[in-house]
Image (cartoon, grey):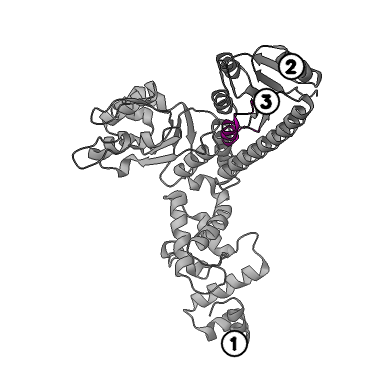
Amino acid sequence: MARTRPCVLVVEREGEAVRALTAFLRQHDFEVVVAHDGESAGAVLDKRRVDALLCALRAPRIEGLAVLAHARARRAGVCAVLFADAPDVELAVEAVRRGAWDVRSHPIHHERLLATLERGLEHQALVERVERMSGELDRRRSVDALVGGSRAIERVREQVRQIAPTRSSVLLVGEQGTGRSVVARAIHHASPRREERFVWLDAAATPAETLEAELFGEPADGDRPARAGRIELADGGTLFVDNVEALTERAQLRLFRVLHDRVLDRTGGAAPSRVDVRMLAATTLELGDEVRAGRFREDLYYRLDVVRITLPALRERREDIPLLVEHLLRQVAREHGRRPRRITRGALERLRRHAWPGNVSELVRTLEGMVVSSKGRGPLDVSALPDALRPTADEPAGRLEIAVGMTLAEAERELFEATLRHTGGNKVRAAAMLGVGLRTLYRKLEQFRLG
């Protein structure tokens, strides 16, 4: 594949010197575009990608600092070399401070300029490559926050990868606790807006009388200063409204106008202002049904439901539970300053079979309780589970569940633990049932930290 020639924009006064410079650059495999004033230079920068800028610092109808700012606004890493006359030392220093790669004095020495250009373009390529790699790493990390290997969660990950680079509104639909806020943050952090704010409002948790002020802000009133709303705070970034169905009718109308006109009409009659906000919304309901029932505006619904991501309930992806448990145990241990704990296969099987009406949020709370309340450093076993997940009296007496994939040591631990539980802690009876001596029983209890 042929190498693309770097494009150089030369902004200089007409004359023999600029014609000679242009010819020299073309001989050295540069594509050259010439502009003789700042206005023409701006038109070029608006139309095409420029790799390098060679510009007079100060000349008739050319303000080098203004052209530099225009070029960097179009491409932050542009290799800019400005040409200064001898008395312009302070202006030259200011040009470098504002991002110029170098400042050269008139008359222009072609070979030295070429060396400067080559170094600047190499540096530009390196910086932009690092930025691309960093951006890709951010995107991977954000998507990797969606833990699991099931087809259902992989489908969600693929949707995030596909829509994150766009500015489309997204509607996240799923039960409480399915990770709607995690997906919303993943979209933001994988998008070009990742350096800007991610602003979150839970409409269901916000009193109806303050919803509009929270979203649209409040003007100054007496001694109380003006307060920016969530929309204004998210300008340039992402606004995530959870439980969007809880918005009041008036808030729905005003939000529609923001999304339709991209103009924020502040509470209290303050002057409207333009805003650039990417909208993410989440709901547990089918908004189409809410529209038909007259509880949600149809125009706002169609503005929000541009792209829809449906989040699976945890019971629909039980195969992800072992990965989620491993990930969440590390996270909970880190948050509470504890050492990471393993979990026995028996306890894990109990977690896997649970219905999880509260989804991942319920799993997080369950594991947090197990980590905080358990003693010792051994694996978390069935006894560490909350009462609702432990074996019940109506289960077949003496039944022991050995999960496929257990090691022999884990199965043996489950056997000793279940037998001791069955005998109510009577070690003599437990040893007799297991067919081992008391010394062996005590040794096993110490080995498995069951004592």
Query: Of marks 2 and 1, which one's residue comes earlier in the chain?
Result: 2
Name the residue furthest left: 222
Nearest to the observer: residue 197 or residue 74:
74
Q: Is residue 328 above or below residue 274?
A: below
Q: Which residue is mark 1?
A: 438
Nearest to the observer: residue 416 or residue 38:
38
Q: CA distance from mark 3 to mark 2?
A: 13 Å
Q: Please tell me how crowded label 3 is: few (under 14), some (14-19), or many (20+) other residues with Cα within 10 Å.
A: many
User: Residue 72, image x and y in percent?
Assistant: 58, 28
Magenta span of residues: 84-102
Q: Is residue 349 above or below residue 158?
A: below
Residue 52 numbered tag? 3
User: Residue 345, image x and y in percent?
Assistant: 59, 63
Report if residue 86 lies within the magenta region. yes
Quarter of the N terminus within the rendering: top right
Q: Please tell me how crowded label 2 is: few (under 14), some (14-19), or many (20+) other residues with Cα within 10 Å.
A: some
Q: Amino acid at mark 1?
A: Leu
Q: Are circles 3 and 2 on residues that touch, CB within 8 Å?
A: no
Q: Which residue is mark 2?
A: 22
Q: Quadrant of residue 219?
A: top left
Query: Of marks 3 and 2, which one's residue comes earlier in the chain?
Result: 2
Report if residue 367 lies within the magenta region. no
> At 42% from the left edge and 65% from the top edge, which residue is drawn?
387
> At 33% from the left edge and 37% from the top edge, which residue is drawn?
229
| In this view, the mark in front (1 or 3) | 3
